[in-house]
Image (cartoon, rainbow, N blue to C red):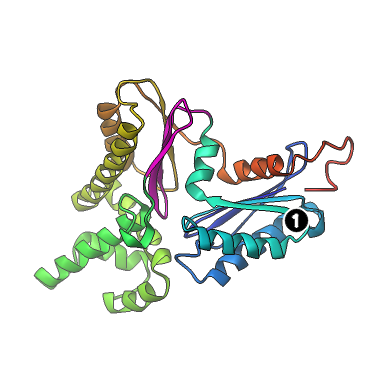
Amino acid sequence: MLGFDGGGTKTDCVLMDESGVILARSRSGPSNPMRIVPGSAVAALKRAGEEALEAAAVAAERVAGVVAGLAGVGDFNVREEMRSQLQTLFSGAQVAVCTDMDLTLESAGEGPLVVIIAGTGSAVMGVDASGKIERSGGHGILDGDPGSATAIGRDAIKRALHQRDRTQKDSELGKRILTGLQVSSWEQVRPRMRDSADDILTRVFPIVVDAAAAGDLEAREILHSATEFLSTLFEYVMDRLDLRAKRFRIVKAGGAMGRSEFFDVPLEQALCRLAPHAAIESLTAAPAEAAAHLALKLTAVPRAAGNHHERG
């Protein structure tokens, strides 16, 4: 079984046998078909899958099931196109494609719970005890994914440029960004933003984190503003699921989490204020593993004793 977790900056892959044993893991580039050319997204999936299969010495034709949780496939036609491409790559397998939000929710376990995702993109998704699902955010380029690493990077660059326009000098944060991107002027950043905005913006995110840790007040304000967006999305989902006065889990996920106290602390403070009965935790199960488990369910292949490494 192959499970994929694909987003705007990377694609994780897990190869699993019929008994649930992980045979190999791999990683490749981005596979969000709304942020990069769909052909490049398929190529990233292909590369990650091939690396996992090669590491475990499993032939592609032995793959029985494939599930890919991908950012950017909320539209049915885009999702179906990606499914069709994966079916071509793994012609003998049963193939399913879902959104990365669906995959993260699956990874989080049983409801009631609300998952807050802050990585390359951002979204909040929840499920109540009856199985009702609600979500907010996850609009990608339509709204800039406020609260995400890319949005934080964009906000930092915007503020730095405004500072330069106003004073004709770079702020301390602006200087840090230029140094971190290994350029000497903003004119050098512009073409790189045009060609690979997500890559540049996600590289700016840790620069903001480091600046905040060093005492930069503007960097701290940028991170705090991001948490306000996320807590607002969380409140929308919580109230639509009628969870405010109930006990439930809040699960934090995504690469922006756990990187800075100036992001994590204000976010948790806002969540505790909005949902005083909720328990806050971080996602422990890798989404790609959840995808592989879904592939196992998809095929429902009987376990073959003593033959775990012959089919994945």
- Does the rendering let one see residue 251? no
Dot 1 lies on which element?
helix
Amino acid, disc 1: Leu
Horizontal relation, residue 13 to residue 189: left or right = right
In the displayed image of the protein, which residue is found farthest to the left? Answer: 166
Name the residue rendered at 75%, 56% in the picture: 53
In the image, residue 235 sits, relative to residue 66, either above or below, namely: above
Horizontal relation, residue 266 to residue 120: left or right = left
In the image, residue 35 sits, relative to residue 128, either above or below, namely: below
Q: For mark 1, what is the residue?
A: 53
Name the residue rendered at 54%, 69% in the picture: 38
Q: Position of residue 222 (x, y in %)?
A: 24, 51
Using the rendered view, name the quadrant where residue 16 is placed.
Answer: top right
- Does the rendering let one see residue 312? yes
Q: Position of residue 21 (x, y in %)?
A: 74, 38
Residue 131 drawn in magenta: yes
Q: How many marks?
A: 1
In the image, residue 94 sits, relative to residue 298, either above or below, namely: below
Name the residue rendered at 51%, 58% in the picture: 76
Q: Which residues are magenta?
A: 110-135
